[in-house]
């Protein structure tokens, strides 16, 4: 899989520069902050529409990867550490797992398809936070949003 436009991460997985560049752009920010930013900028209805659109853009193999990863991530989401995790690292982990899942099923995914998996997972969490105030408050508290920030945001 390595080629001219590929880079290797610390786990030995290769990503084309698009995913690597996105991960660098997302790096230094908590994953929970990305989720909360989606909530802040969009209404529940807009998030539901974005999530539906994101799901519709997925291939069948991508949908299976999202389902598989969401089961695991939902358990992790009960820990504040999950939401404080570096967003760039979460992107790399999600796309690596999606790529492995799809390759195991003889499907070679594009970076766009892999990013759509990450986007669908992010939007799913944002949609949940927009519907469930206690979930949103937990994410806010996990990433260090103070009491008044949680009250107002």
Image: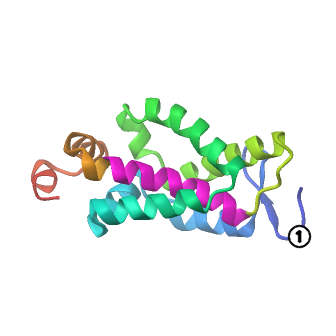
**Which residues fall within the magenta stretch?**
111-128
- For residue 134: magenta? no
Colouring scheme applied when the structure was drawn: rainbow
| Res 88 seen here | no
* Foreground residue among 3 and 121: 121
| Res 105 seen here | yes
Tell me the crowding category of disc 1: few under 14, some 14 to 19, or many 20 or more residues within 10 angstroms, Cα based: few
Residue 97 located left or right of residue 6: left
Q: Residue at x 15, y 56 (%)?
A: 149
> How far across and how far down the image is residue 16, in percent?
76, 64
Q: Is 93 rendered above or below residue 45?
A: above
Q: Residue at x 66, y 51 (%)?
A: 95
Q: Which residue is mark 1?
A: 4
Residue 70 located left or right of residue 80: right
Residue 22 located left or right of residue 73: right
- For residue 125: magenta? yes
> How far across and how far down the image is residue 2, in percent?
88, 58
> How far across and how far down the image is residue 105, in percent?
82, 41
Q: Main secondary structure of the magenta part?
A: helix
Q: Quadrant of the N terminus?
A: bottom right
Q: Secondary structure at mark 1?
A: loop
> How far across and how far down the image is residue 60, in percent?
69, 49
Q: Is 47 rendered above or below residue 135?
A: below
Q: Residue at x 82, y 50 (%)?
A: 107
Number of on-image labels: 1
Q: Quadrant of the C terminus?
A: bottom left
Residue 33 located left or right of residue 118: left
Res. 4 image quadrant: bottom right
Q: Is 4 rendered above or below residue 32?
A: below
Q: Residue at x 22, y 51 (%)?
A: 145
């Amino acid at each position: 899989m390595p080629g001219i436009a590929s880079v290797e991460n610390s786990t030995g997985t290769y990503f084309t520069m698009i995913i690597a560049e996105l991960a660098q752009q997302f790096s230094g920010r908590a994953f929970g902050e990305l989720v909360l930013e989606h909530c802040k900028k969009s209404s529940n209805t807009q998030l539901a529409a974005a999530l539906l659109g994101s799901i519709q853009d997925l291939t069948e193999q991508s949908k299976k990867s999202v389902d598989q990863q969401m089961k695991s991530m939902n358990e992790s989401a009960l820990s504040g550490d999950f939401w404080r995790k570096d967003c760039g690292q979460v992107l790399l982990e999600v796309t690596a797992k999606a790529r492995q899942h799809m390759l195991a099923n003889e499907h070679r995914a594009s970076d766009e398809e892999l990013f759509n998996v990450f986007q669908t997972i992010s939007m799913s969490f944002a949609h949940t936070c927009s519907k469930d105030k206690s979930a949103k408050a937990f994410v806010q508290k996990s990433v260090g949003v103070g009491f008044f920030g949680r009250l107002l945001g």
